[in-house]
Image (spheres, helix red, strand yellow):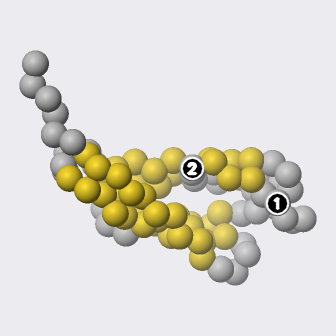
Amino acid sequence: MKFKNTGTEPLIIKNARGSCGCTVPNWPKEPILPGESGQIEIRYATNRTGPINKKVTVTTNEEKEHVISVLGTVNPEVKK
């Protein structure tokens, strides 16, 4: 997920945590300066087929949490 710091102060992502062990976020560790962009990568264990409805909670220096919803479907592998 790409994002942009639209504020006037550097944005610091303190933590990002998935709602379960199958959802693993990776985020920038350096401050994102005003007007700059960053990206949070979210990996999901695709060995589990079926619908996905997971959340990643992001804590920043804004003193509030942001929630990213991860929605989709993992289809079974098609044998050739």
At horizontal 51% and vertical 47% (from top left) the residue drawn is 41
Residue 27, horizontal then vertical, whole percent: 57, 53
Residue 15, horizontal then vertical, whole percent: 56, 66
Is residue 73 shown left or right of residue 12?
left
Q: CA distance from mark 1 to mark 2?
A: 16 Å
Q: Are marks 1 and 2 in contact (CB under 8 Å)?
A: no
Answer with the quarter of the image where residue 24 lies: bottom left
At horizontal 59% and vertical 71% (from top left) the residue drawn is 66
On residue 1, the disc is: 2
On residue 15, the disc is: none
Dot 1 or dot 2, earlier in sequence:
2
Mark 2 crowd level (few <14, some 14–19, many ≥20, 10 Å Cα): few
On residue 6, the disc is: 1
Task: Name the secondary structure under disc 1.
Answer: loop
Residue 10, horizontal then vertical, whole percent: 82, 61
- Which residue of the protein is positioned furthest toward the bottom in this rendering? 63
Is residue 79 shown left or right of residue 4?
left
As drawn, 69 above or below 79: below
Is residue 19 shown left or right of residue 45?
right
At horizontal 78% and vertical 57% (from top left) the residue drawn is 5
The quadrant the C terminus occupies is top left
Look at label 2 and name its amino acid.
Answer: Met
Closer-to-camera residue (78/7) = 78
Mark 1 crowd level (few <14, some 14–19, many ≥20, 10 Å Cα): few
Look at label 1 and name its amino acid.
Answer: Thr
At horizontal 51% and vertical 64% (from top left) the residue drawn is 68
Q: Report the number of discs.
A: 2
